[in-house]
Image: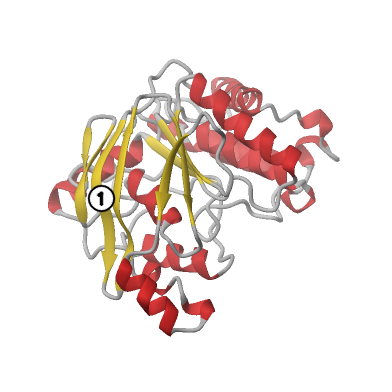
Amino acid sequence: MNTTRQGAAVNARGIGVEGPRGWAFQGIDITAEPGALIAVQGSSGSGRTCLLLALTGRMRITAGEATVAGLPLPKRMGTVRSRTAIAHVPGVVELEPALTVGEHLKEQALLGHRFQGLGASLPWGKRQKEATRARIDAALAAVRLDPGTLVKGLGTAVRDLERIEALRLSVALGIMHGPQLLAVDDVDLKLSAEERAEAWQLLRDLAQAGTTIVAAGSEAPADALVVRTTPAPATAAKAEAAPAEAAPEAEADAAPAEAAPEAEADAAPADAPADAPADDSGTADGTHPHTDGTDKEEAAHAFAETGRA
């Protein structure tokens, strides 16, 4: 894991994402230095998840202007994707309950080899094993997840993890290839007060180490840069006229149509390391998509519209 790369500065003015049936979010302004801890707050259906995807180049903004690490969005979406990562986003990228902690970590570590000049040796040669082990150990240390405290160590299935442990594992997978910016959704969902404090402290420590963090949660720490999402007027009016469960409807179609040609030329895999070459083929990132609630299904649908991870 690259621990020396500088975090990404984030600058946005009036950004928004609009789909055929309305706005997912709009009018968002952000000015954050590298290594900032940005907390995204907002009601259900206000576009928090879509904002995370937009800032990481995984959803095309349709209004306003933004740069991440000095790269303009949406023109350089592919490059932004290669320098950022997402974690703990239900319906888009999440852990597979049947796989073990070790399997998730090894899969994610091996994904980086094709981008870092390690393909010349045999797949399971000594060099590969050492690089994989070092990458895994660094990621676990960074999120303070000790396999010795788990029920079966690295052989513990995800379904047997506590929620805070699963969050730490998700973040470990996200930072494994040294992104300049990491986006984390639902940071404090269903956590106790003590666990919420642990979760935010984890992200605070990563930010202080240099990685820019954008995290959606219900209770932001006092030292975070808070960004609030609220339903756009048209969306809010539609929500009042519709059943409560249909309120997040606008977010379902938040994704754009086809990415602009400039972005297509830059396209890269979702969580490729920052020094990876652009690649439109796309790769898995050690986690697996599922649906988990209306809001997340809609974000996943919007995410899928972009055509790449």
Name, please, the residue furthest toward the top.
Answer: 4
Q: Position of residue 299 (x, y in %)?
A: 44, 62
Question: At 38% from the left edge and 60% from the top edge, which residue is drawn?
Answer: 303
How many badges with numbers are in the image? 1
Is residue 61 shown left or right of residue 105?
left
Q: Can residue 165 be seen at all in this image of the molecule?
A: no
Is residue 118 shown left or right of residue 68?
right
Above/below status of 296 relative to 65: below
Query: Which quadrant of the structure image shows residue 171?
Result: top right
Q: Which type of secondary structure does the marked residue at label 1 adopt?
A: strand
Above/below status of 76 relative to 275: below
Q: Which residue is mark 1?
A: 15
Of residues 123 and 46, the one drawn nearer to the viewer in this rendering: 46
Q: Position of residue 87 (x, y in %)?
A: 52, 44
Of residues 3 and 155, the one drawn nearer to the viewer in this rendering: 3
Q: Position of residue 29 (x, y in %)?
A: 29, 43
Q: Position of residue 190 (x, y in %)?
A: 70, 53
Question: At 39% from the left edge and 70% from the top edge, which residue is drawn?
Answer: 252
Residue count near mark 1 (Cα–Cα under 10 Å), binned few <14, some 14–19, many ≥20: many
Query: Which quadrant of the structure image shows residue 272?
Result: top left
Above/below status of 69 relative to 210: below
Question: At 41% from the left edge and 33% from the top edge, which residue is drawn?
Answer: 181
